[in-house]
Image (cartoon, rainbow, N blue to C red):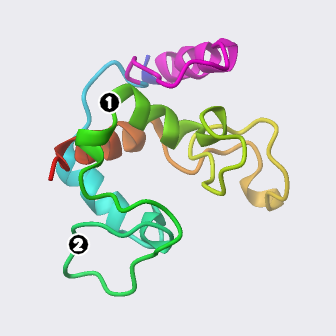
Amino acid sequence: MRLAAAMVAVCCLVGAAAADDAMPGSLTGAKGDPARGRAIVANRQVGLCLLCHSGPFPEERFQGNLAPDLKGAGSRLSEGQLRLKIVDPGRVNPATIMPAYHRTEGLVRVAPAYRGKPVLSPEQIEDVVAFLMTLRD
């Protein structure tokens, strides 16, 4: 059931107008877990977020400076805007260097073992969104 909901959400995203800057519906139909989301963001083997972003992670050394600081992300962007920026950031900014964490079609230079596979599952996307929404300072 969750996989079907995720597929519908991604299909709706592909058909959305280019002016849309948000993906309001959850990929799973449920809210994510902020604690799991924080762990994904901070994990350099799963989310890889800190390669480019910095944020309120005092325990993490060597945070990135190529992308906006994640501090205050929940104040700057809506839940739907955050979700779209994670699922397919190219829909918001075609020139972005941020990878699409859930889109699998139309990508280039993807290793054969990873073709057709999203970086994060729908549940992981929702966990990251839930965590980022807690960053209000």
**Which mark is on residue 57?**
2
Return the residue nearer the eye: 11 or 83: 83
Check disc 2 and give the amino acid type: Phe
Please name the residue shown 47% across and 24% down the image: 22
In the rendered image, residue 120 lying in the magenta stretch gets the answer no
Secondary structure at badge 2 equals: loop
Please name the residue shown 43% across and 59% down the image: 68
Please name the residue shown 37% across and 22% down the image: 26
Please name the residue shown 24% across and 51% down the image: 72
Q: Is residue 24 above or below residue 44?
A: above
Please give the range of residues in magenta: 3-26
Check disc 1 and give the amino acid type: Glu
Return the residue nearer the eye: 107 or 134: 134
Give the image location of residue 80, x and y in percent: 39, 26
Give the image location of residue 66, x and y in percent: 53, 70
Q: Tell me the crowding category of disc 1: few under 14, some 14 to 19, or many 20 or more residues within 10 angstroms, Cα based.
A: many
Q: Is residue 6 above or below residue 119?
A: above
Give the image location of residue 45, x and y in percent: 48, 71
Secondary structure at badge 1 equals: helix
- In this image, 19 relative to 107: left or right? left
Q: Is residue 85 above or below residue 48?
A: above
Q: Which residue is mark 1?
A: 79
